[in-house]
Image (cartoon, coloured by chain):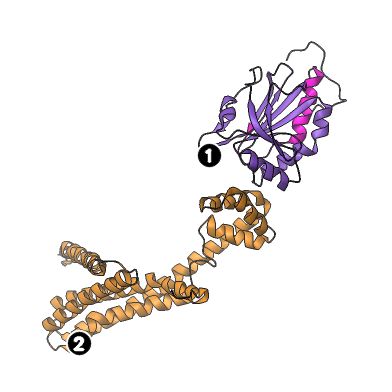
Chain colours: A purple, B orange
Amino acid sequence: MLKPGDQAPAFDMPCSVDGAAGRVSLGGLRTEMVVVFFYPRDFSFICPTEVIGFHKHREDFAAAAASIVGISVDDVESHRRWAQELGGVSYPLAADAKGEVARLYGVFDDKEQVAMRATFILNRRRMISYAVASQINVGRSVSETLRVVKALRSGQPCPADWQPGDATGPAGLKY
Amino acid sequence: MAVIRPEEKRRLFERLANIREIVFGVQDGVLTTAGVLAGLSGAVSGRSQVVLAALASTAAGALSMGAGAYLGTHAENSVIRSERERTRVESAQQMYVIQESLLGELAKEGLSREASYRVVKLLSNAPQALFATAEQKIYGLAEEGAGNPIRDGLLMGVAFLIGALVPLGPFMLFNSIRNGLIAGIAATAIVLFTVGYFIEGRLCELRRPWTAGARFLAIALSAAAIGYLIGLAIAPLGTPLG
């Protein structure tokens, strides 16, 4: 799995966005930050809470200058129907049918043949600033991802449980 | 093609589930009693003594086997019921785990992932239906445990009694111990072969049902022969000390 400081591998994949088929590429995303989250499969009972969660917070992420891309091994039609089932998803759900992108990020589960539940936050130079993965049956926290995006954008040392508006650490402090 | 009647099929499967008790009881009744007859025929000179001992052994065996089957099924039901209740409480707290597992099982059986999802979602509207289906699909549990303890106990005991009559009946028809024993052993072999032939060979529609009969006979007689040999081996231990 890639770690903070690594260059994020580029991707260009078919996707479903706002109920239509399209393409999404890392190079085509112009926001300061990019949240790339991998999830195992469409039509599951854990993933929807995350997919919906990111959709519900889409304006908060946009306000934090972050785009969101969801990636799984399902095809575009599955993504489209899944997004429809969930009431619509406004950010791209990319079809990594052979798991190639998941492999590049080091989050492909060979046994299950699906992507692990992993989240990466990329900075403006598309280097990885944050990487987290969890066991396949444990959902992640969307609000925590948003908090980390905001903390990274602050450019300051942020103590544990830091929230926007809280004091940051002394400028220039490295660790 | 005959119309399938699900209720009749259900009753048939319930009856077939008791074949284990019937086969086990008959086989044990036949072999135990044949063994008693063979053993006592060599050791005791009076025919009536042999018959009385075999009858006592049959009564004890039938009661013991029946009680064993009753207790076994009762214990199995209790343990499974308790574990099932505990699992249901855990499942209710982590519904998504059960949903995800059931979805996987349905997908394995050929449903598309999307169709499996929709089936599980529908079932989730009635948690009892979801849990019952999950228990069958994920854990392989039958509806209400292993069986009926009273029915299993009675079947096992009666099957043992019937099995015991196989060598004992012909034995009692002859005044000579030797002739009675030969008739009893012959009847034992015939019945063991027949049980295998019909239950496994014919009911399961095997191409060569006689092989099922022969296998049944061979396994049963091998067990008896090994038991006899062990008896011979330990016989010297019964010599009075001193």
Q: Give the residue drawn at x 57%, y 26%.
A: A106
In the image, residue B188 above or below residue A155? below
Check the residue under mark 2 and report the chain it is in. B
Instruction: Please report contact status of discs 2 and 1: CB closer than 8 Å, yes or no.
Output: no
| Quadrant housing residue B207 | bottom left
Q: Residue B33's x, y, as percent? A: 25, 76
Q: Is residue A158 visible?
A: no
Q: Is residue A49 visible?
A: yes
Q: Nearer the viewer, residue B81 or B116?
A: B116
Q: Residue A140's x, y, as percent? A: 69, 36
In the image, residue B64 above or below residue A108? below
The part of the chain drawn in magenta is A133-159
Residue type, numbered disc 2: Met
The residue singled out by tag 2 in the image is: B172
Check the residue under mark 1 and report the chain it is in. A
Asked whether, in this view, residue A109 is left or right of residue B201, the answer is right
In the image, residue B186 above or below residue B98? below
Residue type, numbered disc 1: Glu
Q: Secondary structure at mark 2?
A: helix
Q: Residues within 10 Å of mark 2 (few under 14, many from 20)?
A: many
Mark 2 vs mark 1: in front: 1
Point out which mark residue A92 bears. none
In the image, residue A12 above or below residue B239? above
The residue singled out by tag 1 in the image is: A112
On whether residue B242 falls in the magenta region, the answer is: no
Give the spatial CA distance, label 2 vs label 1: 67 Å
Q: Nearer the viewer, residue A81 or A172?
A: A81
Q: Residue B229's x, y, as percent? A: 17, 63
Asked whether, in this view, residue B242 is left or right of residue A10, the answer is left
Q: Residue furthest front?
A: A21
Q: Give the residue drawn at x 83%, y 32%.
A: A60
